[in-house]
Amino acid sequence: MLKRLDKKSLFKSISKPQLIYFNQNRNFTIGGSQNEETPNEFDYIVIGGGSGGLACSKRLSIETPLNTKICLIDYRDPTNHWLEQNEFRKWIWGLGGTCTNVGCIPKKLMHTSALLGETIKHDISHYGWKIDSISHDWSTLVQNVQNHIRSINFGYRIDMTQTFAKDNEIKKLFYLNMKAKFINDKTIELFDPKKNVKKTISGKNIILAIGGKPRLPDDIPGAKEYAITSDDLFSLKNPPGKTLIIGAGYIALESASFLNGIGYEATVMMRSSPLRGFDKDCSFKLIEGMKDRGVNFIEKSVLKKIIKLNDKEYQVEYINLETKEIRVDTFNTVMFAIGREALTKELGLSSLQLDKEGKVVVNEKDQSISHPHIYAIGDCINRKFELTPVAIKAGSLLAKRLCNSECDEIMDYDNIPTSVFTSPYEYGCVGLSEEEAISRYGEDKIEIYITQFTPLEVAFAHRDENKTFMKLVCLKKDNGDEQVIGFHYVGNHAGEITQGVSIALKMGATKKDFERTVGIHPTIAEEMCQITVTKRSGKDPNKRGC
């Protein structure tokens, strides 16, 4: 039985055969003795220590026989911008991947900082609180965010260790903080850039969980020299100041949103519609809210070049795609959020079949169609969802299938919930958008229920009247039922509300099921049980009163 250990008792509680040790290459081995060398041959090699790789390697360590050898490899090079501000010897890429180090975790913390500012500036006086003045310190926020990230990195190492702290059984999971490159489809060369050390290993089964990185354009002068990406934003030593963000996806909108909420002028440059693939009604309501709070938008425009004026200012030149007018402006920080690319090219395996975006082509069991002993999960495969929980679930299921021939459960990519953490309103959704539903089933088979209302705590603060929005996308069945195949919500606590609704959609809930459910009052979520206005009716969806 697994025993939960705290940090102080960890080394005391693990018997000598499972001693954890750190070798000269900054890599540590879990299992075995301190004098044992890292093996050259493994049963399973997992490349990538992000959410999917961690989930897969830990599950493999639990499910496999005692003599199984598993290797987890993880490393990411620092960005050029990071190297300009720091010495290479100080570079640390901790376990946890993009989500922990430069993604979900720091993003949510900075989003929370912006929400707290929103509450202080707009709401607390109505609740009787009096604050003479407020100010925000960027360096304090960044330092605390980075400290929290390091604590999570350490926690992942401890969690891996605890997998082996049981009944003196010897299992081996070796973690190597090194770069991986294929020599052939079963042999991998490892390289430690700090120690200039190389090692070669081989594996019977290889799992790719390498994730991706933000794209920087090659055809825009100054982009790679002067611009940053989300990989840099959360560790900036100096305040970003007046910031231009190029992109129309959720990373661009979330970043502009929290920078504006913290107190920096933020501008988003978009060449097309925001949040493509998401529900259009909700996407535009998000933009309206951001504009209302002061975020600037340069629409239907593309960046032409970036010129460095001095250490603190950059001149950008851009063109409006409709008028063809060329304009110039000055910013302190320029950030690209134009999408991500899989890190497959760095692996050097030319025979691995990739799609046109460089992602690994896999079958429904996450198995490479070109190499049956190579598997891939998470952001590096040819699937739609680049989300942390998707990688975790896919990694765990893959490990179960590899260890148990009777297990045939595969990853279900339908009805996956997600949330966009913008302010003043967040956006949560699960299932099909209105546009997707109509395209798939036809307009006559789809009924759209909508409501707009003002939550109690927002109404009390006298702001944002009827800006909270909720939509149910329903499929008309032959028996008269309406199955809810899409839920969309714009407002506070979007992730928390949507997570609960996603279970209902996964179970095939109908509109009547929602209506039969008693809501909790006074809450935002209760409104989903009371929606009666259909979009096709043309009636006013705005709700007044409780």
Image (spheres, rainbow, N blue to C red):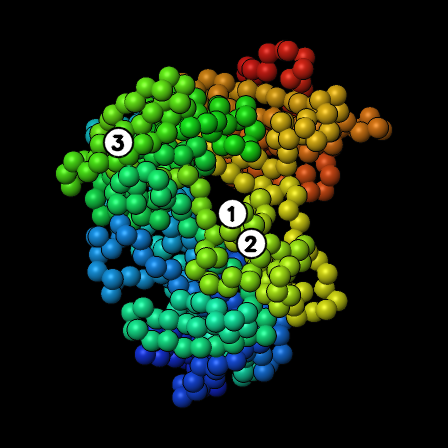
User: Neighbour class for label 2 at 10 Å: few (<14), some, many (≥20)?
Assistant: many
* Res 44 label: none
The answer to whether residue 262 of the structure is visible from this angle is no
User: Between residues 509 and 270, which one lies in front from this camera angle?
Assistant: 270
Q: Secondary structure at mark 1?
A: loop
Q: Nearer the N terminus, badge 3 or badge 1?
A: 3
**Quadrant including the N terminus:** bottom right
CA–CA distance in space, label 1 to label 2: 8 Å
Please say if 17 is above or below 381.
below
The answer to whether residue 227 of the structure is visible from this angle is yes
Q: Nearer the N terminus, badge 3 or badge 2?
A: 3
For image coordinates 62% across by 56% down, the residue present is 362
Residue type for callout 3 = Val
* Res 357 label: 1
43 displayed left or right of 104: right
For image coordinates 30% across by 41% down, the residue present is 223
Q: Which residue is mark 2?
A: 354
User: Between residues 130 and 373, which one lies in front from this camera angle?
Assistant: 373
**Quadrant including the C terminus:** top right
Q: Secondary structure at mark 2?
A: loop
Where residue 47 sits: x, y (%)? 49, 65
- Number of marks drawn: 3
User: Neighbour class for label 1 at 10 Å: few (<14), some, many (≥20)?
Assistant: few
Q: Secondary structure at mark 3?
A: strand
Do tag 3 and tag 2 residues touch (Cβ < 8 Å)?
no
Where residue 307 sits: x, y (%)? 22, 36
For image coordinates 22% across by 48% down, the residue present is 237
